[in-house]
Amino acid sequence: MPCQLADQVVAYRRELHQHPELSNQEFATTERITRWLQQADIRILPLALTTGVVAEIGSGDGPLIALRGDIDALPIAELADVPFASRHPGVMHACGHDFHTAVMLGAARLLKARESSLPGRVRIFFQPAEETCDGAQQLIDAGALDDVAAVFGLHNAPELPTGTFATRAGPFYANVDRFQIRITGKGAHAAKPEQGVDSIVTASHIVSALQTLPSRSFSSLEAVVVSVTRIEGGNTWNVLPQTVELEGTVRTHNGDVRRQVPDKIRQVIDGVAASLGAQAELSWHPGPPALINHARWAAFSQTVAKEFGYRVEEAELQMGGEDFAIYLHHVPGVFVSIGSASEFGLHHPRFAPDEQAIFPAAQYFERLAERALQQLADVPQQAVSHA
């Protein structure tokens, strides 16, 4: 079975790679995953989900844990030179969610082969809409996390060699918040700027002033990123526009810092705009919180990884976001990185993870799930959950 399954999980990944679908549009992906699970006689839970699948393996009154893989793709035109490139123009699995899904399909089949000996149940999430940060909450609202004692997830890491495992206790990924700033001045002829209030000049000063927030409003020991990623204003060359809109993101790992940022931004934009005779309005859109790994499960995952044969490293803090964080605000668990050795990084049109990393990762998660169930069955769950 191992050799055949190793080939099969790569085949799963390649079929998914050829047919990527954007967040909340993963209808064919959902159908494929459902069919593959049913062919393996794996139980699918009848949850009210538009896309995505939740499977369960095991039985009885023992502990319940969850594994999670995400299934959505990105609006990127693929340039990777592979025979199984995306057949959907402008859409690509450029973040490796096809890799993650194949890993969890492999883990599901391995666990199914040992179902009668499992000391509990393993629930496997094939989650939609990670890229838009709303898939985890969809599964929680549908009841996927009900009664789960611990949750485990992964992301491939193209910067790490194949055979490498990394995680860390405590903060790992940052929160993901989005802001929009609307600047209102007074339109005028470009040759007579004194008759108007220049919203573009005001926007330029605001962009520069916002960069002082990480270094002057918060401790230098805190990781804070404020990035303006879109500036939109004006539609011709000889008119000062009435309005300009800015958009961007803020990332940090500290909840207290996160709560202060909107007021700090308002102080900056109000002051700059007023000094130039304009007005500025902030719209704040909070996303997933920082991903905080539970110390006990982080250490547990590292121990299992060492026993499995991975080269284990302490993961670096990440400023990217991950909606797996939402699960960890409800249930203890850990998120880990598996080396995928791609020359090109995540979200690059030539991203190409090493497929040799897929089946070992499936085997690792099968072992991690069994070991976690054993630990939960042997140790009172309350002691594990609050460690």
Image (tube, rainbow, N blue to C red):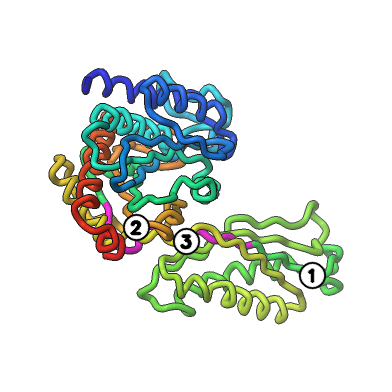
* Rendering coords of residue 239 (x, y %): 83, 59
Does 154 sit above or below residue 182?
above
Does 377 sit above or below residue 102?
below
Name the N-terminal-most of marks 3 and 2.
3
* Rendering coords of residue 183 (x, y %): 73, 67
As for residue 168 lying within the magenta part, the answer is yes
Taking depth in this image into account, of 111 and 216 the one nearest to the observer is: 111
* Rendering coords of residue 94 (x, y %): 45, 36
Q: Amino acid at mark 2?
A: Pro
Q: Amino acid at mark 1?
A: Gly
Question: What is the crowding at mark 3: few (fewer than 14 residues within 10 Å), some, or many (at least 20)?
Answer: many
Does 101 sit above or below residue 195?
above
Element assignment for label 1:
loop
Report the predominant secondary structure element of the magenta stretch.
strand
Q: Which mark is residue 185?
A: 1
Disc 3 versus disc 2: nearer the observer: 2
Give the residue pinned by disc 2.
332
Find the distance from the CA under tag 1 to the CA under tag 2. Answer: 49 Å
Disc 1 versus disc 2: nearer the observer: 2
Give me the residue at 81% from left, 64% from top: 242
Give the residue pinned by disc 3.
289
